[in-house]
Amino acid sequence: MVTPCIWRKSSYSGGGEGNDCVEIAGSPTHISIRDSKTPARATLTFPTGAFTPFIEALKTTSSGDVLDPLAAG
């Protein structure tokens, strides 16, 4: 697993202190995301080419639906 070293907060952080957000880190081959409130917990890591289809699927899927990452694209 690739361990990114530089994390940055999403520009879509929640109001106030911006505590409700996702952090992202990238390398030439992978992109990782994590919950900024619990950075030591689980991290999702994607090959660079799979990240954009994943985000697009999140944008087009209605709330509450379960995504099949193999069906995206």
Image (spheres, rainbow, N blue to C red):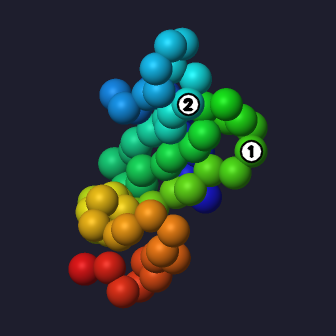
Q: Residue furthest top?
A: 17
Residue 63 on image: x %, y %: 44, 64
Q: Which mark is on residue 41?
A: 1
Q: Amino acid at mark 2?
A: Asp
Q: Residue furthest bottom?
A: 71
- Mark 1 in CB contact with mark 2 (< 8 angstroms): no
Q: Residue furthest front?
A: 63
Task: Tell me the element at label 1.
Answer: loop
Q: Residue at x 67, y 31 (%)?
A: 37
Residue 46 on image: x %, y %: 45, 61
Q: Residue at x 51, y 76 (%)?
A: 66
The answer to whether 11 is drawn above or below residue 46 in the figure is above
Q: Label 2: which residue?
A: 20
Task: Tell me the element at label 2.
Answer: loop
Left or right: where does residue 8 sit relative to residue 56? right
Residue 49 on image: x %, y %: 29, 65
The answer to whether 35 is drawn above or below residue 68 in the figure is above
Is residue 49 visible to the viewer in this orientation of the structure?
Answer: no
Is residue 4 visible to the viewer in this orientation of the structure?
Answer: yes
Crowding at mark 2 (Cα within 10 Å: few <14, some 14-19, many 20+): some
Left or right: where does residue 35 sit relative to residue 46? right
Image quarter in which the N terminus is found:
bottom right
Which image quadrant for residue 44? bottom right
